[in-house]
Image (cartoon, grey):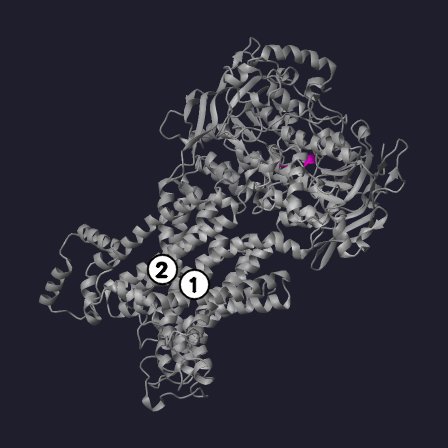
Amino acid sequence: MKFGTSLIIGGALFALAIFVGLLAPWLAHTDPVMDANLMNAEEPPSWTWWFGTDAQGRDIYSRVVHGARISLTVGIVSQLVNSVIGVTLGLTAGYWGGWWDDFVNGLTNLMLAIPSLIFALAIMAVLGSGLTSLLIALGLTNWSFTCRIARASTLSLKNQGYVQAARVLGYGDLRIMITQLLPNMLGPIIVIGTLGMGSAVLAEAALSFLGLGIRPPYPSWGSMLSEAREQITTAPWLSIFPGLAIFLTVLGLNLLGDGLRDILDPQSRSQRA
Amino acid sequence: MTDSPLIEVEGLRIDLNDRASHVAAVEGVSFRIDRGETFGLVGESGCGKSITALALIGLLRQPLSIGAGVIRFEGREIQRLPAAEQRALRGNRIAMIFQEPMTALNPVSPVGQQIAEMFVLHKGKNWREANQLAVEALASVRVPAPERRVKDYPHQLSGGMRQRVMIAIALACGPDLLIADEPTTALDVTVQAEIIELMRNLCAERGTAILMISHDLGLVANVCRRVAVMYAGRIVEERGSADIFRACSHPYTQGLIDSLPRLGSRAALGRTRLREIAGVVPAIADFPDGCRFNPRCAQATEICRTTAPELTLLDAGGLVRCHHHA
Amino acid sequence: MRAGWSGAITMHEPAARPGDDVILRVEDLAVHFPVGGGLLGGGRRLLRAVDGIDLELKRGECLGLVGESGCGKSTVALSILGLQKPTRGRIVLDGQVVTDRQSVDRKALARIVQIVFQDPYASLNPRQTVRRTLEAPLRLHGVTAKSEIDGRIAAMLRHVGLRPEQAGRYPHEFSGGQRQRIGIARALILNPRIIICDEPVSALDVSIRAQIINLLLELKETLGLSYIMISHDLGVVEHMSDRVAVMYLGRIVETGDWREIFERPAHPYTRTLIAAIPDPLRRAPLATTPGELPNPLNPPDGCAFSPRCLYAEAVCHREPGPSLETRPDGHSVRCWRADEIAGQTALASTESGHP
Amino acid sequence: MLSFVIRRILQTIPTVLAVVLVIFVLFSVVPGSIMSSMSDDGRATDPQIAERMKKQLGLDDPVYIRFGSYIASLATGDFGTSFRTREPVTSMIAKRAWPTLQLIFAAMTFAIVIGVPLGFIAALRPGGIIDTISMVVAVSGLSMAKFWLGLLLMYLFALKLGWLPSFGYGDGGLRYLILPAATLGVSPMALLARTTRAAVLEIMTADFVRTARSKGMSETLVVKWHVMRNALVLILTTIGLQLGALMGQAVVVEKLFSWPGIGSLLVDSVLQRDIPAVQGSILVVVLFFLTINTVIDVLYAVIDPRIRYA
């Protein structure tokens, strides 16, 4: 793909998702939860029902539009939490070294050893379903990659002349970390954060699909798909549109991340997980 | 032996193709190297000496390409040869060693195998014979216990040992020309001395010509019979190395010689303020009009700013590209 | 245009100043790193990066510190700067012992000793303007008045040959030589007494080196600085130093007045280093030394240089090098056979050698 | 080499212990979690019954004693007894281990067989048509929710075309494996294609590749002798990381296709609050992941001498 193309397409898709999420109440035709009407059950897509209706006669278009709010909230907030945890741990571990570094390394290995979706699932099992539990479960389980990158950047940056010079000039550790190290590792961190948002959106959908995230009747894309699964033969549109929404949002974030990587972090194109 | 030189470069131009624009990183470079001769190419980073070498061995990669000029090896134009014949020359007749002996060797392959490849590629040996020859090659560059060392990986060797391995690879097939691109820049002086002597002796024994590329005029003058000085993509002076420190003609060469404190000069002359060359080395896209050295030259006049000087033959031998040459 | 081509200006050759006060004293400094170990990692071994060295730096003096890479000269620098905790020994800076306290007062240290780094590209924060690079340390050290900050930054930039209006630019807008000037300005902004120059010109274009060397020498005179000049380029060391210390494998093997070291090198290693420099005026074989720098984890028995030494005898392979023996002229050597070799050197230097 | 293997195995022990601790804390110490989880949907349980169950399960003991006995029983291979089926968790997991392994290895094979060559071909002509198409496919594959993709595949190949069974394990035959494995394999395939491409592109600019060319090698030989092995190091890393992620994704895919593996056991147990079964399943997943990673690290050392001698 040409340089910049992915940045533009990705940025546009993500902006569209944000726009839909912010303006959901105005864009939706009906109330996503309350406007059930069995008279309109399982209508295929038409001019009246853009994306069709479900078994209870609710407008899928309106539900998909409202679903954007939940998906984006989960994606953005949980990834912010992950980034903050990962950067804080990685930066301090790389800078101070010693037992703290060993400890953070152990913690990272532990987090990597438990597949993050399963970890999140376990936390959801304990906390119960709901948006807050989702934010906690996803915000605490996906920081290990950020942490590794932050630690690796710190290790390579800390022997750079300007960081050494800052120490020689009498800067305190905290000041060095904030003014010298952090600004110079922000590129890769932002890239990982963008890609991580995509993973969080997918994870939210998966958990809701399994019945552990957002519970019906609230319109999360994952929970909609969960409900739609039973009607895949009779009403395939129920599956298509929420899934498409997830796909486009995550695609946007992934393309945006790739595009940003080309600009912010040209060296590490090979690493991605 | 014969009049025809081993390698002859005429009017070489190397283009840097950058999307819309393309600029000449190297322009009008001509020189010749005879059989068994030692020739040095000196200049600062960005002057085009390394890419000139890469052009000789046919390793220029995008965004760099040969824009004009001819490179003749034993009278044959290299660029005109079919790809397979070019490859048969590469490594076999023209070999090259690089600056960074750490990254120039494949980290996941034993050094013996990396030498043996040469015999498989060019001498039609099978791997067993090639591995045997690799031990001999390693012994010839005076690596102790070569039969054990062939199994070592590059990271197990010191910088000096790695550069010996590089020399063993380069000289494996007995090439006619060895291109050495800053072969000792990454090494300590004592190791540098050993590598240089090794290279010099082996090439002298086998009649291999050397094209040595370096930023260190002193080193090149010591190793080579003739020296060409490059500045901003052009050769500005070419001389016998015996003359260049005594009586150079180009202000840039003079500047290079004067700007470095030479060992023993303080003891002999007292501490003098070093002569500076003002200004900075221009980037490829910003080469000035006229003589490319004119913004930094104390002797520059109007003609230097408008007209590019030609290479002129000096009475005392040698070539210089300066309107006001001494 | 700075400094043109017109004739060489002979600079002030400082006369020997005996009894000058010592601004930095390093006593029996050792830095050992444990290597390996850990779970099943086999035996833990000690890397003796610096193994008991003594140094003195006088006010206004430039001390050259030379040796091959891995000899420990950078570790010495880091210890003096308070960035590396010594295993043993003391460092006395301007009358204060800085190694005895539990934690070094980095701010106080910062006002005495600073460093100029080798690589002008990695030594400036790419996300800070020159102004911020110079302003932050001033603020940190209690200079808050804007006018004073601006004044000091402008003065400092002029000192190092830059224009004050360039302060708003980022490092990538400068050439290598200019960046090194910024690095020097940063080192000087707190008015320190001592500058450690760690290979200050070896990463620069050849035609730029003279500018920086001249600048460093000028600043030393005008600001009354003392330098520790770390370099592997003996030409630069000879040009800049008043005294020279030669390190080999964590120890100082020879120290003395620059003229003594370069004209009458007493230690075989020093002689090796000097002989290895190619002579540009002659196409002649370079003097080579057999073997390589030994692995500091596994140093040879006896004198550390003995496996490579042309003069080594039984005693050299058996006994560790003698303690540094100081002659009346201040020239000290750590070699069993120094006196015999000195005799030969005198003979050899009349036959050949550098002009 | 042997000492490297032993060291590597010993290094995983603290991680295993830490995982056990985390699982224990999560389900046995977090206040009220176990009791509230014993009732459906958080409705109040009869206090007397609750009290009796607490006694029976030893929940009155101090935490460290409970942890000790938990570890002790784990050490003997006893994962406890399922709350729901009253069956030993060990045997429940044993029954489901094989289908999960089948699924994961099938998915990984699919990913490697398609992803790695795709990445290689893409890298040989960067910016070309194949490169562009395969990278568009790759980024799309990464952006799809697995269960959505599974639903679409199920709809198309099972319900519309009728080529393959729509769900279930059936007789364990290959026909039943294809759809779930393909669904699960898409994202590692996409990632492998991208990693391989990036690795090859990066290595092609390395200094030692220039050395190889200076020896007079053809591009084919350069790739064969010098690029492949180095690329493998980077590809292996991705495979190792992806196997872990695959265990997570397997939960969703198994549930969607009603595949009788550990993943669907985990989801069912979570939904039914069957704590011992949840703990056991997670532990087995982690052990599997750690085993795989140890194997990968050993393979690493075989390929890359720098690691072996480090």
| The magenta stretch spans residue C204 | yes
Residue A139 numbered mark, or none: 2
Q: Is residue C158 visible?
A: yes
How packed is label 2: few (under 14 Cα within 10 Å), some, or many (20 or more)? many
Report helix, strand or loop for mark 2. Answer: helix
Q: Which residues are magenta?
A: C203-207
Disc 1 is attached to a residue of which chain?
A
Q: Foreground: B159 or B259?
A: B159
Amino acid type at image mark 1: Met
Q: Is residue B112 above or below residue B68?
A: above
Magenta stretch, overall SS: loop
**Would residue D263 be found to the left or right of residue A248 on screen?**
left
What residue is rendered at 32% in x and 79% in y?
A33
Q: Position of residue C298 (x, y in %)?
A: 49, 28
Q: Position of residue D155 (x, y in %)?
A: 44, 81
Amino acid type at image mark 2: Gly
Counting every numbered tag in the picture gives 2
Q: Is residue A73 visible?
A: no
Q: Position of residue D52 (x, y in %)?
A: 10, 64
Q: Foreground: B215 or D308?
A: D308
Q: Position of residue B129 (x, y in %)?
A: 66, 45
Q: CA distance from mark 1 to mark 2?
A: 10 Å
**Would residue B206 be found to the left or right of residue C322 on screen?**
right
Residue matched to label 1: A197
Q: Is residue A61 above or below residue B61?
A: below
